[in-house]
Image (cartoon, rainbow, N blue to C red):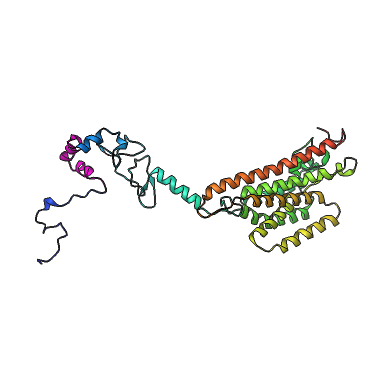
Amino acid sequence: MENRPTYGYGADDPDPAQRPRPSYGYSAGDAERAGGADGAAAGTGGSSAGAADDASLPAHQIPGGEQAGGPVCPRHPDRVSYVRCKRCGRPACGECQRPAPVGMLCVDCEKELAAQQRSASPRNMAGGRMGSSTPFLTYGVIGLCVVLFLGQTLIPGGAVEQALIYAPVRTLAMPWTLITSGFLHGGVFHLLLNMYAMYLVGTHLERTLGHWRFGAIFMLSLFAGQVAVLLFADPMSSSWVGATLGASGGIFGLFGTLLIVNRRMGAETTQILVLIGLNLVITFTIPNISWQGHLGGLVMGTALTAVMFALRPKASPGADRAALARRSALIHGGVLAAGLVLCLVLIAVKIATVPAGYLPLL
């Protein structure tokens, strides 16, 4: 029993009054102030030169972030806090505390950790942030096409077609039809074929490119298809008043996008080339199919995707991926805007060449 260790405390201590007082992570001055009146006197008396120097400093500049009443929050020097950030060790008041899986973080550390997580977060193939994996834009296009087809079928008098279908003669009088006509279809088979292709290609590309890039490419391809119809239409022929409808222009644009994406990923491109070839053969051999719309959408979708990948910022080891994503978004937004401007310029050039009276305003 004589050799039993005492560890500096317990009934065997020769003088329990001499046991070390725990500081709980605070400075010696904090422990003294927490001890009672003697500590308070020592903390406010200013008997030492160091205390006198500290008293001349603002509360938030006192070493350890402390003032006479205890440690203070660096962001709110008038608030005493004994809760410290588990990352940097600085005191944090109730307003500046952020819960963490273990302990608390201060506001600054929370922001730094969030920035680090964003910079290390995975990116999609186009360099954007990984969004929701649900291709809601693809489903939205399919749903809108189905709803409008029901309107075409159930509303008598062809009111839906009259309001939304496009013909070159309507370019100035009803310019919205350059877009809305792409969501109308000429029959059940036409609708099912386009929506099946939209589902197969759209769900894959929307997850690969991200929602807004995918949606912009589809809409611009759809728009470019109608612009091609206008460019190739002769004001002196029946094509000038012939109506076009269907989402085929946008879907052909997605075919071209899929071709570029597969090439960039090193995936097989033979199947998509065969698919595009077969659809072009059908387009040019079967009557009453708008080859202009198909060709215009294919060219626009392919060109946009190729330029976007060519200009995408390259990531180097240790690079800020969040900053690269923002830069990529700006560049790709500029590419898409350039595609839209090109379509508008082509429309203006065509309108300028049309004889007076062939493009009514109303």
Between residues 305 and 69, which one lies in front from this camera angle? 305
Q: Residue furthest right?
A: 236
Residue 208 part of the magenta segment: no
Mark yes or no: residue 126 visible.
Answer: yes
Coordinates of residue 41 in the picture (x, y in percent): 17, 37
Q: Which residues are magenta?
A: 26-48
Which image quadrant for residue 52?
top left
Residue 45 part of the magenta segment: yes
Which image quadrant for residue 262?
bottom right
The residue located at (76%, 62%) in the rendering is 274
Residue 84 versus residue 44 in the image, above or below: below
Which image quadrant for residue 259?
bottom right
Coordinates of residue 163 in the picture (x, y in percent): 77, 39
Coordinates of residue 32 in the picture (x, y in percent): 19, 43
Between residues 45 and 296, which one lies in front from this camera angle? 45
Secondary structure, magenta segment, majority class: helix
Coordinates of residue 141 in the picture (x, y in percent): 68, 49
